[in-house]
Amino acid sequence: GWREAVAAAVGALQAGGLVAVPTDTVYGVACLAQDSGAVRSIYSLKGRNGGKPLAICLGDVDRLYRYCHVNVPDELLHDLLPGPVTLVLKRSEELNKDLNPFTSLVGVRIPNHPFVREVARACSGPLALTSANISSQASTLTVSEFQDLWPQLSLIIDGGPIGDVQSPECRLGSTVVDLSVPGKFSIIRPGCALASTVETLRQKYGLIPESS
């Protein structure tokens, strides 16, 4: 059923739908980032204020250069991605103007999860990706935990429980780090991979925390 599930997800996304997918951290809801109507649907699904940005999700690191201005070594990207980290970079002109129109930055996710990467590869542009929950409620680790969203979703891909449902740490989501300022980094959300991310940025690449 893997191929059928990928094809069903891609078909629903291309039709402008919202699809719930498992990732390497928590369950997410995806739509095509270049489809302005679908992006509006994600905001209304989550009851989310339009000032809160959506991340984009790609299948591979090399696709990132099309949608972002990258000012860090390629090797750094490959050290952190794919993985439970969102890298915030300056957005390029290529990205839909209706996606996060209030900021020149965009967060990029390449989850270390074969299914969502396969779906992202099969779509022509990036996915917009957010956690499968009502804004400000806890992240979800099983599909039954976001039952209240089901009626508004075109498709739900059940990848089973993600991590330990009893563990609050498993619900932290990805570590969000801003790399848009050359030579510096700032942590926007500590998330689940904070220590290893900071160690990579400081020890291996000599980046300085923004506040210092």
Image (spheres, grey):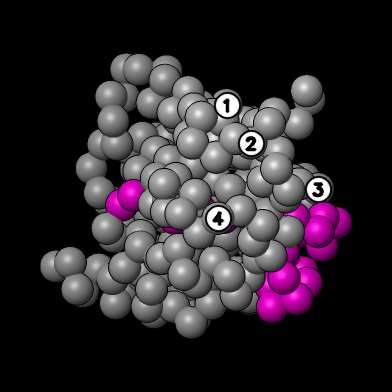
Q: Could you give the CA–CA distance between mark 4 and mark 2, rounded to whole angstroms?
A: 11 Å
Q: Residue furthest left?
A: 1
In percent of width and height, residue 69 lies at: 69, 65
User: In the rendered structure, which segment of residues is drawn in magenta?
Assistant: 91-113
In percent of width and height, residue 148 lies at: 49, 42
**What amino acid is found at the position of numbered circle 3 in the picture?**
Gly
Please tell me which of labels 1 and 3 falls first in the chain: 3
As drawn, the label of residue 190 is 1
**What amino acid is found at the position of numbered circle 1 in the picture?**
Pro
Q: Could you give the CA–CA distance between mark 3 and mark 4, rounded to whole angstroms?
A: 30 Å
Q: Could you give the CA–CA distance between mark 1 and mark 4, rounded to whole angstroms?
A: 22 Å
**Which residue corresponds to the image point at 85% horizontal and 56% vertical from the top-left?**
102
Task: State the quadrant of the C terminus.
Answer: top right
As drawn, the label of residue 51 is 3
Q: Secondary structure at mark 2?
A: loop
**Which residue corresponds to the image point at 49% horizontal and 49% vertical from the top-left?**
76
Please tell me which of labels 4 and 2 falls first in the chain: 4
As drawn, the label of residue 207 is 2
**What amino acid is found at the position of numbered circle 4 in the picture?**
Pro
The answer to whether residue 73 of the structure is visible from this angle is yes
Please tell me which of labels 3 and 4 falls first in the chain: 3
Q: Residues within 10 Å of mark 2 (few under 14, many from 20)?
A: some
| Closer to the camera in the image, 30 or 57 | 57
Q: Residues within 10 Å of mark 3 (few under 14, many from 20)?
A: few
Please tell me which of labels 2 and 3 falls first in the chain: 3
| Closer to the camera in the image, 156 or 77 | 77
Q: Could you give the CA–CA distance between mark 1 and mark 3, rounded to whole angstroms?
A: 20 Å
Is residue 101 highlighted in magenta?
A: yes
The mark lying in front, picked from 1 and 2, is 2
**What amino acid is found at the position of numbered circle 2 in the picture?**
Leu
